[in-house]
Amino acid sequence: MADFLLVDGYNILHAWAGLKKVMKKDIDHARAKLVEVLGNYQAVRDVQVIVVFDAHLVKGGTGSKENVTGVEVVYTAEGETADMLIEKLVGRLTEKGRVTVATSDWIQQRIVFGKGAVRLSARELENEVAALKCDIQEQIDNVIDNDRKLHGYLDDNIREILEKIRRQR
C-alpha cells in the first residue's frame, strides 16, 4: 500500500508566511519553491506527493500534469477547481493506499475526511516540514562531527589496536 499526500497548492502558498511573501513578488518562483520543499519531504517520508494548483479561470485551459523531481504537479482545467480535482483523486487513491490532504480549507477538509482521507492543515504541514528539516540537519551535523574525530580517518584494524591499548590502562 502506498502513501499519498495531496496538496492544495495555492491554499498552502497563502498560508505559509515565507511563501506568501515570495508569491507577492513572483508567483512562479513561489510555486517552484513549494514543489522543491515538497520534493524533499517526499524523499524523506516515502510518500507520493501530488500538488494541485487552480487554473479554472484560465480561458481555454485544458489542465496539465508534470513531474518535477518526483512530485506530480497538476494544474486544473478551465472550470475545474483544485478542490474538485482533489476530491476526485481522493476517491481514486484511497483504494491504493493511505491518502492525506493538506489544506486549511475547512469545507474541503470535511469532504475529504468523509471520503476516507486524512486531513492536514497548512500549519501542520509547515510544522512537519520544519521538524523534518531540523532532523535532517541534525543527522548531517552528526555525520560531520563523526568524520572530524580521529576514528573517522582510521581503518578498522588500527581502531581495534588503539581500543586494546586504551582498555589496558
Image (spheres, grey):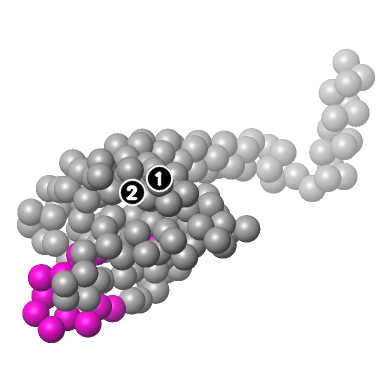
Residue 23, position as x, y percentages in the image:
13, 55
Label 1 SS: helix
Q: Is residue 26 magenta?
A: no
Which SS does the magenta portion mostly show? loop
Is 151 left or right of 54, judged from the image as shown? right
Residue 157, position as x, y percentages in the image:
87, 45
Residue 24, position as x, y percentages in the image:
7, 54
Say what amino acid the circle numbered 2 marks.
Ile
Tell me: residue 147, above or below residue 40.
above
Q: Mark 1 — residue?
A: 113
Q: Is residue 62 magenta?
A: yes
Residue 101 circle label: none
Q: Nearer the viewer, residue 5 or 111?
A: 111
- Residue at x-position 68% and y-position 43%: 152
Kindly indicate whether the residue at mark 1 contacts the one at mark 2 (C-beta within 8 angstroms): yes
Give neighbour class at mark 1: few <14, some 14-19, many 20+ (Cα, 10 Å).
some
Question: Can residue 39 be seen in this snapshot?
Answer: no
Q: Mark 2 — residue?
A: 111
- Residue at x-position 44% and y-position 61%: 91
Quadrant location of the N terminus? bottom right
Question: Can residue 97 be seen in this snapshot?
Answer: yes
Q: Which region of the structure is painted magenta?
A: 49-64
Say what amino acid the circle numbered 1 marks.
Phe
Q: CA distance from mark 2 to mark 1?
A: 5 Å
- Residue at x-position 47% and y-position 53%: 99
Residue 25, position as x, y percentages in the image:
7, 57
